[in-house]
């Protein structure tokens, strides 16, 4: 038979006075719910973050909003995403048109 070495009873770090004892986590402060930005405020934020000259992109986005019959005052993030996607398609389309050489008829 093998003899086993007696061991001391285990204690948790929380109950022992060891320096490794865990501190209680601070209570999380519940953040106030901020309503999502809409309208001019949302558009201005996107324009400032875009890095594109403000006058240029504002004019383009407003033109797209008019085409889509969207009211600026109630513009939501989802609507702005659709407007931005349209803007990117227009820009990419015009860049592709400029980069392809005109086709000449072959005889």
Image: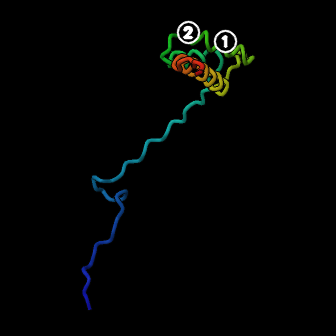
Q: Position of residue 93 (x, y in %)?
A: 59, 21
- Between 13 and 71, the one lying in front of the other is 71
Asked which quadrant contains residue 94, the reply is top right
Residue at the image point whose x is 36% and y is 59% from the top: 15
Q: Secondary structure at mark 2?
A: helix
Pointer 2 residue:
56
Task: Please give the label number shown on residue 63.
Answer: 1
Q: How is the image coloured?
A: rainbow
Q: Position of residue 76 (x, y in %)?
A: 67, 24
Residue at the image point whose x is 62% and y is 15% from the top: 61
Q: Residues within 10 Å of mark 2 (few under 14, many from 20)?
A: few
Residue at the image point whose x is 42% and y is 45% from the top: 25
Asked which quadrant contains residue 63, the reply is top right
The reply, left or right, for residue 23 in relation to residue 69 is: left
- Between 88 and 57, the one lying in front of the other is 88
In the displayed structure, 20 sits above or below 31; it is: below
Task: Please give the label number shown on residue 13.
Answer: none
- Between 13 and 17, the one lying in front of the other is 13
Q: Position of residue 40 (x, y in %)?
A: 63, 14
Query: Does residue 18 appear in this view?
Result: yes
The reply, left or right, for residue 23 in relation to residue 2 is: right
Query: Does residue 42 appear in this view?
Result: no
Residue at the image point whose x is 61% and y is 25% from the top: 85
């Amino acid at each position: 038979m093998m003899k086993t070495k007696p061991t001391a009873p285990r204690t948790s770090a929380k109950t022992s006075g060891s320096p490794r004892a865990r501190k209680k986590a601070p209570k999380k402060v519940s953040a106030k719910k901020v309503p999502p930005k809409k309208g001019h405020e949302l558009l201005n934020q996107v324009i400032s973050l875009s890095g594109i000259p403000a006058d240029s992109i504002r004019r383009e986005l407003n033109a797209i909003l008019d085409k889509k019959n969207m009211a600026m005052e109630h513009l939501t993030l989802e609507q702005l995403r659709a407007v931005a996607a349209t803007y990117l398609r227009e820009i990419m389309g015009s860049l592709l048109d400029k980069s392809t050489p005109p086709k000449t008829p072959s005889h």
